[in-house]
Amino acid sequence: NKPVTIAVDGPAASGKGTLSRNLAKELRLAHLDTGALYRAVGYKTLQAGVPFDDEARIEQLAQSIEASDLASPELRSEATGAAASKVSTLMRVRAAVGEFPKQFAENPPPGSSGAVLDGRDVGTVLLPNATLKLFITASDEVRAQRRLDELKSRGGNLEGVTFEKVLQDMRERDRRDRERAAAPLKAADDAVIIDTSNMNEAQVMDASIAEVKRAC
Ligand code: C5P
């Protein structure tokens, strides 16, 4: 029995992370947030003060990532998100990071019959034969508001954080993710696209479960 694999891709703050956690729980699958891997590399790069074009040193940092690096609350900051999108343009960094999610999906942890992976290139590059591919999106404004709400709910320093600034930073990150040569953000040809602009968490979940039933 091949493990069930669900690929969930989409731009920043589209709701793909929340959906992936909900799907994994409901379907008793393991969940891997592949963005956290790139965030960990981005955070290490910032901390070590390595310039973003030093591919060889950032590749080394990527190879040194351990499970404990994925738990840091610093991973969730906007600065780390921006750093992640810079290091993830580097081919050798993608090669170093990319093996882990593939292994995870092929050999999910004991007790789970498969895995949900979310990111930017899960359906296009990491798992081209996924059981189901979802591409989750929403308007720029809706996504910026969600990101702002998330930043507020987490507390922390909100100095200089405005809707306009969040929107602008998000658009810049999306552009970098879409336009890069290596595994750009895009929906796989066989992905089901769900626009969540006018949907709540439960509605996105219902629409996705309907697709799971069709695909499995
Ligand atoms: O999803 P998240 O916002 O945590 O991802 C942070 C950054 O990591 C993205 O903007 C993207 O540049 C990069 N990423 C990627 N490939 C993935 C997941 C994330 O390049 N599969």
Image (tube, helix red, strand yellow):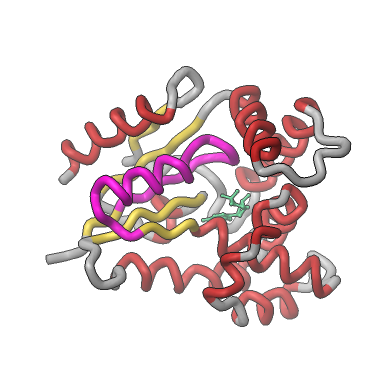
* Residue 98 vertical placement versus 137 (above, below): below
Boundaries of the magenta span:
6-30
Residue 3's place in the image compared with 92, above or below, is: above
Counting from the top left corner in percent of width and height, residue 112 is at 24, 63
Rendered image quadrant of residue 3: bottom left
187 relative position to 85: left or right: left
Question: Which image quarter is the N terminus in?
Answer: bottom left
Which residue in the rendered view is the most extreme toward the top?
198
Q: Residue at x 49, y 68 (%)?
A: 98
> Could you tell whether 139 is left or right of 173 in the image?
left
Residue closer to the observer: 28 or 87: 28
- Residue at image point 27% right, 45% down: 26
Which residue is outermost to the left? Answer: 1
Q: Is residue 84 left or right of residue 30?
A: right
Residue 2 against residue 6 in the figure, above or below: below
At x 30% / y 68%, what residue is drawn? 108
Q: Position of residue 57 (x, y in %)?
A: 74, 79
- Where residue 11 sits, quadrant-wise, is top right
State which quadrant residue 190 falls in: top left
Q: Residue at x 46, y 26 (%)?
A: 196
Where residue 167 appears, as percent x and y from the top left, is 73, 30
Left or right, 34 with respect to 151, comes to left
In the image, is residue 26 part of the stretch drawn in magenta?
yes
User: Is residue 211 on the magenta stretch?
Assistant: no
In-front residue for pair 83/186: 83
Residue 211, horizontal then vertical, whole percent: 24, 35
Looking at the rendered structure, the number of numbered marks drawn on it comes to: 0
